[in-house]
Amino acid sequence: MHTIHSRIRQARTNKGLTQAELAEKLNISITAIQLWENKDEAKATAPKRKRLEEVAKILGVTVTWLYTGENFIQTDENPKPTENPSPSEGYKKVMIYTIDLSKKS
């Protein structure tokens, strides 16, 4: 099963970067990268949204691909991705809801 952790590792290696090089570009510790790429889901962490956007930009992939594995990996043949492809192109629309469960009815 592919996870955000394996996709970060895959995109980093496809880009030819070491964990240390990615950490340096993000101005963070190599330990953070190691935790993001940890194969043990119980020990792995993931970058927060803003940091994930930086990771995606550096690695040449979309945030959507890092989260879900869908959309694309940037290549020379596909240098400019479509962030919002039409459903006819085989992509799924994902709805995100915010529900406040703290209020009593």
Image (spheres, helix red, strand yellow):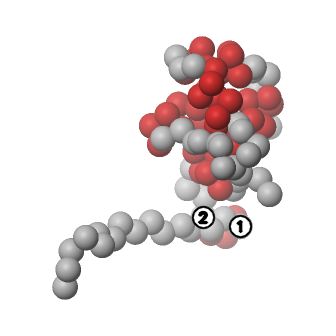
- Asked where in the image residue 52 lies, by quadrant, the reply is top right
- Residue at image x 71%, y 67%? 90
Give the residue type at disc 1.
Answer: Gly
- Classify mark 1: helix, strand or loop: loop
Seen from the viewer's position, the closer of residues 93 and 26 is: 26
- Residue at image x 47%, y 42%? 49
Residue of label 2: 86
Seen from the viewer's position, the closer of residues 93 and 53 is: 53
- Circle 2 residues within 10 Å: few <14, some 14–19, many ≥20: few
Residue of label 1: 90
> Residue 70, position in %: x, y?
69, 56
Pick out the residue farthest to the front. Answer: 42
- Residue at image x 54%, y 38%? 47
Q: How far is the residue under mark 2 from the one under mark 1? A: 8 Å
Give the residue type at disc 2.
Answer: Ser
Q: Is residue 21 visible?
A: yes
